[in-house]
Image: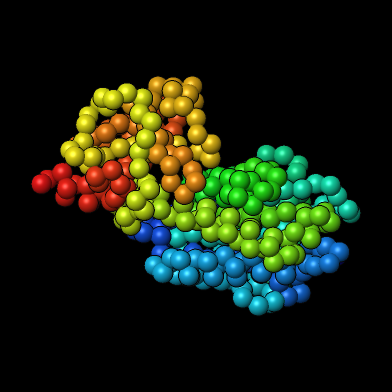
Amino acid sequence: MIQRKIFRFGVFALIFLAPMFANAQKGEKIQTIVIDAGHGGKDTGALGKITTEKAVNLAVAKKLGAYIEENMRDVKVVYTRKTDKFVELSERAAIANRNNADVFVSIHCNSTEGATTANGAETFVMGESKNEKNLAVAKKENAAILLEDNTDAYDNFDPNSTEAYILFSLSQSLYQTQSLNLADKVQKQFKNKAGRHDRGVQQAGFLVLWKTSMPSILVELGFINNMKEEQFLNSEKGQTQMALALYRAFEEYKREFEAENHTAPKPKANDKPAAKVSDKPATSGNGGTYFTVQFSTLDKKVPVTDKAFKGVKDVEVYEYNGAYRYVSGRFTSKAEAVARQNEVRNLGFKDAFVIAFINGERGTLKQAEEALKK
């Protein structure tokens, strides 16, 4: 048994460490994703009856990377490992930072003691472990450092010490809001497209996420010690479905981020608004060209008068990629749209962002500005 001192890391350092690494995702495009297949080599991860966690993680990671490389030629895919090799937790984060990654996705499988009926997928972001279950998951994943030769990078952190997580849990990424946004998209895809039980978005103290300087998530694909889930995760069909779910979530996150930052490509022709609250929005566009504020995305269509949108003015909805996207107002100037965005964010929709329609189709903000000048 390796003895370690309890993690000694000042509150000041935990809170202010993140800015030292905040050198990613400051542009207008998402150009690089780092895909981390958890465990590997001498670190098998959780064990099932017919496979190992490290094998499932790698298979799904490589499929996810292949989908991105095939369909998003503007995105560079970097893997922390593409073979069955051991990579230290600190090195996984370092790979992401060295490549100035815009997104970091760490792929894992869950497990409990002995056989289990526990099932479903969940996605974690860096933060405080809210309950014993989340703490147990973090301890299991962080235990990989016990296989490492040099642990100086972790400041004597003991992955088995509950006390060690008290200060560590105060370390929250500068990109927590974006990480939560991506995690939410992942969970919706796991549930609605891959048919998995939704265990929700969680927070816990994961060493692999600690020093990443970009939106970062850790996914638990399912329980490898649940025989039914293990069979699914070990199958070509199951691995494909989970990889596709991750791909769709990343694609949606990328598209929304770049739309907010003026760089989104022109969407497909079926990306049209519909179902207005009234026939007279606050400010009408010119010839179907206008700015609006997207504030919510749902898998099932609800009325624009739904109580969840209480207080939001001039709500409309359009369908894109199988999801319903809710917007507020139509404006002939970007400044007016930004003012509405601030109003909507103050109502609790913190991720609301400005988008544009050109002749009834989604376009970039720059395209709309040019069209409205004519």
- Asked where in the image residue 142 lies, by quadrant, the reply is bottom right
Q: What is the tally of numbered marks visible in this picture?
A: 0
Locate residue 294, reporting x and y percent. Answer: 38, 38
The residue located at (46%, 39%) in the rendering is 324
Question: Would you place residue 227 above or below residue 90 in this image?
Answer: above
Left or right: residue 53 compared with residue 288: right
The residue located at (34%, 51%) in the rendering is 269
**Residue that extends furthest to the left in the rendered view of this protein:** 374
**Residue that extends furthest to the right in the rendered view of this protein:** 114
Q: Quadrant of the N terminus?
A: bottom right
The residue located at (40%, 49%) in the rendering is 256
- Asked where in the image residue 236 lies, by quadrant, the reply is bottom right
Q: Is residue 369 visible?
A: yes
Please state which of residues 307 and 88 is positioned toward the viewer in this rendering.
307
**Residue that extends furthest to the front in the rendered view of this protein:** 270
The residue located at (58%, 59%) in the rendering is 244
Please state which of residues 166 and 350 is positioned toward the viewer in this rendering.
350
Q: Is residue 129 visible?
A: no
Left or right: residue 149 compared with residue 18: right
Locate residue 316, reporting x and y percent. Answer: 37, 32
Locate residue 210, reporting x and y percent. Answer: 58, 56
Locate residue 69, reporting x and y percent. Answer: 48, 70
Question: Would you place residue 308 above or below residue 357 in this image?
Answer: above
Question: Would you place residue 261 above or below residue 339 in this image?
Answer: below
Q: How is the image coloured?
A: rainbow
Left or right: residue 312 compared with residue 188: left
